[in-house]
Image (spheres, rainbow, N blue to C red):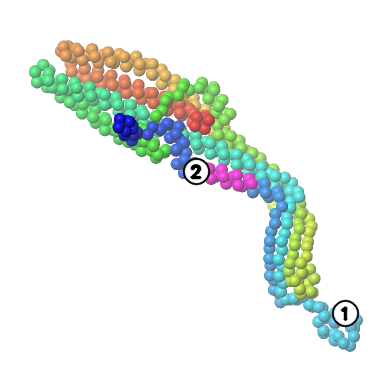
Amino acid sequence: MKSSWIALIVLVGAVALPAEVTLSQAVSDAWALSRALDSQKLEEEAAALAEKAALRRQRFSVHFAGAYRATTDTIQVTAGDFPFSLGPQVPPGTILLATPGDSIDLKLSLLQPLYTGGLLRSAAAAEAARGAAERELTRWRRIELAGRVKSSYFAFLAARGKRDSLLSLLARLEHHLKKVERLEAEGLVRRSDLLEARAKADEVRLGLQDLEQQLQAEAVQFHSLCGHDPGEIVHWPGGDADAFDVAWAHFLARHPLLRSLDERQGVATAGRRAAAAAYLPQVGLVAEAHYGRPGQNYFRDAWTFYLQGGVSVSLALFDWNGRRTGLRLADIAARKLENQRADFVRESEKGLRQLYLALEAAGRKRALLDGLAANAAEDSRLKERLFEEGQIDHADLLAAMTGEEKVQAERQALAAQVERLKTGIDALIGRCEEEE
């Protein structure tokens, strides 16, 4: 019986307690929910299929074709076409041979490229580079989404820290208000002191309404990204951020977008080779199996099976500077990628330096706030005693109490801000612990 009660208590506790979810799990769930990320994965899959198709174009292909043709003009050979008489039994107008008025041809063809000047090889290389670029873009989308999820969570923590500080201040004010009401009833304080305390409490309640709205908005944003309530999340702050030089080296070596742009340079290079190869001789092997009526002998109106084979050669001789245009377009694409890469590196360096400056400022501010918090707490206790002794005005005590809670709120918000800054650094340099 006792074990049954214990099991029931454990079961009720398990049902009552909300499930805890790590921030990393929330990030993984956001990846699973994101339609944009799924679309990028489809782009990656499409690129892989295009690469396979490009490789297969270097192999032989088999085609089937059928044709039916009818004509009103046929070829006829009459006895009069000969320069000599065929005898009295064959009058001059007698039709000796004639082609049929219609024909049917069923054809099975095998085509094998023999030499394309590197055209097919360049096309395959371009698709391989495009596939690699799409894979890196998929990684970048994952890292970008992870940064949004974490940033939303830390914004929620900052707002919750401010709310908790205001709740603590409100609790102190309500306790203080009861004391002032008692003192005012005994005639030991002025009526204005009581009104000041009530006004300050109402002011805090008004601020709490704004913070609750902000909290709800952040919770909705977080839930839309990963499907979880931010209150469910369990997160342990990580270590300190790397030095700037280490982070910058990671960015240059491993950022997915930089890698994607480098792969797209490979696409442009392969496109230039393909544009040049298109104007070299294109040689292919052709083998055909025909079944039709008539066959090769058009004067024999009968179904015939026959084989054909040979080599096809084609060469572009003149197409209004198409080769030069193709090469120029490939060069333009390469230059645009170079400019895009340079702009991205420059903007990223600026953003990373700004993040590290903000992180250093937050570190200095945290040290100052620790000292301010100790001083504000001592000042609040001292002025509370002085007010009870009638040595200071009531407004001075309220200012001290408000100042103490304001410093505490700033400390909590600063801790969340530091985590957001570290998240921003990781996202900017293309690092995501959930992928490692």
Q: Nearer the viewer, residue 73 or 142?
A: 142
* Left or right of 393, for residue 405: right
User: Is disc 1 placed on a helix, strand or loop?
Assistant: loop
Total count of labels: 2
Q: Furthest residue to the left?
A: 186
| Location of residue 417 in the rendering, given as x and y in whole percent from the top left corner | 40, 26
Q: Which quadrant would the N terminus be assigned to in this image?
A: top left
User: Relative to 86, does residue 255 appear above or below in the rendering?
Assistant: above
Whole-Å distance between the Cαs marked 1 and 2?
78 Å
Which residue is pictured at 15% across the width and 20% down the height?
Answer: 180
Q: Which mark is residue 38?
A: 2
Disc 2 packing (10 Å; few <14; some 14–19; many ≥20): some
Along the horizontal axis of the image, is 223 left or right of 325? left
Residue drawn at 70 percent across, 44 percent down: 121
Whether residue 45 is in magenta: the answer is yes
What secondary structure do most residues of the magenta stretch adopt? Answer: helix
Kind of residue indicated by mark 2? Asp
Give the residue type at disc 1: Phe
Residue 286: which quarter of the image? bottom right
> If you read the primary sequence from the N terminus, does the residue marked by circle 1 or circle 2 appear first?
2
Mark drawn on residue 82: 1
Q: Position of residue 21 (x, y in %)?
A: 40, 33
The stretch in magenta equals 40-52
Q: In this view of the protein, which residue sits in the foreground, 304 or 365? A: 304
What residue is shown at x 72% (from left), y 76% (from top)? 101
